[in-house]
Image (cartoon, grey):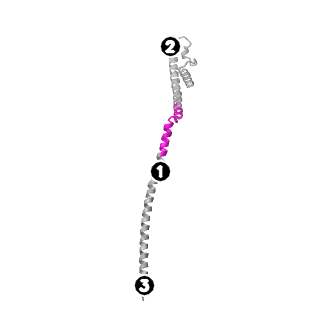
Amino acid sequence: MGKLEAMSRRVLMLEKKTGACVRQLQQELTDTRKKVSMLEASLEVTAHYHTNSENEKQESERKSHQAANPNADLPDKWNLHLSVLLHLSAETQRFLKEIFMKELQRNLTHWRREKAVGRRSSAPPAHLNERSGTSPVEQYKRETEERARRM
């Protein structure tokens, strides 16, 4: 019986040691899981800060480039303003021509009335002739073209 008791004690002792080892390993596993969880959270924060840092770096580089090259968009602005100016110039010429034609028609009508009454000569004055070539529209057009050539 002595051998059986010794073996029983030995089995109990080994079971206690095994239980202690299992508890210790379970505790280490729990601790390791906590550390992994904390490291993952830390990694997420670090990644977030890294992303923000990259975005700030790119924004800073963009602003630096703009500060170093403030006139980079001037050709585009110039072309836009030139286009608007040319459009407005064409509109102005069209309106001036309309005004000139209305004024010419009014003056011609007035001249014809006076001629019918007998106060005028038979030929209309040169400024009432549509083909005289000295219309305000043509004069404005020449001046605009001269300014455009000087630019």
Other residues around mark 3 within 10 Å, as few (<14) / some (14–19) / many (≥20): few
> Could you say whether the residue bearing mark 1 is in a helix, strand or loop?
helix
Q: Nearer the viewer, mark 2 or mark 3?
A: 3
Kindly identify the residue that appears in the image at 43 percent across and 62 percent down: 35
Say which amino acid is labelled 2.
Glu
- Which residue has dot 2 on it? 114
- Which residue has dot 1 on it? 51
Q: Which residues are magenta?
A: 57-81
Of residue 32 and residue 119, the one placed in the foreground of this image is 32
Of residue 95 and residue 9, the one placed in the foreground of this image is 9
Tags 2 and 3 touching, CB below 8 Å = no
Q: For the C terminus, which image quadrant?
A: top right
Kindly identify the residue that appears in the image at 51 percent across and 15 percent down: 111
- Which residue has dot 3 on it? 6
As for residue 30 lying within the magenta part, the answer is no
120 vs 66: above or below: above
- Magenta part, dominant SS: helix
Other residues around mark 1 within 10 Å, as few (<14) / some (14–19) / many (≥20): few
**Left or right: where 99 falls relative to 23:** right
> Could you say whether the residue bearing mark 2 is in a helix, strand or loop?
helix
Say which amino acid is labelled 3.
Ala
